[in-house]
Amino acid sequence: MTSSTSRTLADALTTGTVVLDGGMSNQLESAGHDLSDELWSARLLAERPEAIVEAHLGYFEAGADVAITSSYQATFEGFAKRGIPRERAAELLGLSVELAREAARRAHAKGVRRPLWVAASVGPYGAMLADGSEYRGRYGLSVAELERFHRPRLEVLAAAAPDVLALETVPDTDEARALLRAVRGLGVPAWLSYSVAGDRTRAGQPLEEAFALAADADEVIAVGVNCCAPEDVAGAVETAARVTGKPVVVYPNSGEVWDGRERAWSGRSSFTAEQVTGWETAGARLIGGCCRVGPGAIAGIAESLRG
């Protein structure tokens, strides 16, 4: 059951384009929250859950149809490093979905009338390591080992009944294979979204090969890219649509560059709302933003797509 309607997200993708939200971290940081911890925004699930609701609500009010939960960096292993027991970690994972649902309820109470959905974020193994390896992949683990890492978290998130599982920022085909295995039988649809550089995954595999893995996966309702430069999106949309025949999901970064040594963003934004009409024409049906893309940009996307 969706947060506002019996119509599924998959149904919506057959008739139009759906607007995703923007970056969670920039919303929280702009509200004054320190995210320098290894748990990143997931730390606020325990410490400031109301802040997460407000961040989601800001995007719904800006025009987003889908809220992506704050569980990207939330894992049993990551919480364990902070002394959080497994039972409590499971509660926090489920809470991430409920907080997004609460934001949808508040949006409706404030007059938003369109359907709203919740996507449970499932970040890559490298996000748990918090060392930048999520942008390199090739962790030295087998597909089976990665599947064993992801499956317990996916089971907990699926039990919280999101509308879709967002398998996002995937850097290589090994992790994609593991995630596609891990979502089988959960009863919740998923999208698979790679982090890319040019026409290849972050680990260097051709996107045709990467997207093809999901072509016959019944659980996957959309395939695409996120957390990449806006300039990398157009080619990826064309390839994903051609290779899989599925709706395409895209939510790039602003175009600024993260400096890991200085722990700061540099450069200028190259993301414009006008780009999205070309992505839609090429086959994108879920369109939003990732890091450094805020409510203003999402409002521009919504205006462009809804005319």
Image (cartoon, rainbow, N blue to C red):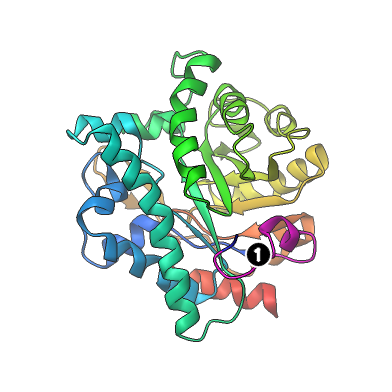
- Is residue 214 at least partly visible in the picture? yes
Residue 204: image location, x then y, percent: 58, 25
Which of the pair 111/301 is nearer the observer? 111
Which of the pair 169/98 is nearer the observer? 98
Q: Main secondary structure of the magenta part?
A: loop
Residue 252 sits inside the magenta stretch? no
Q: Where are the magenta residues, as a range? A: 3-17
Q: Mark 1: give few (<14), some (14-19) or many (20+) Cα within 10 Å.
A: many
Query: Which image quadrant is residue 180 in?
Result: top right
The residue that mark 1 highlights is 18
202 left or right of 278 in image = left
The amino acid marked with disc number 1 is: Val
- Is residue 260 at least partly visible in the picture? no
Q: Residue at x 70, y 50 (%)?
A: 248
Which quadrant is home to the C terminus?
Answer: bottom right
Which of the pair 161/12 is nearer the observer? 161
Residue 7 sits inside the magenta stretch? yes
Residue 287: image location, x then y, percent: 62, 60
Is 227 drawn above or below residue 202 in the view shown?
Answer: below
Residue 113: image location, x then y, percent: 58, 81
Q: Which residue is drawn at 51% across and 60% down?
A: 270
Residue 192: image location, x then y, percent: 62, 40
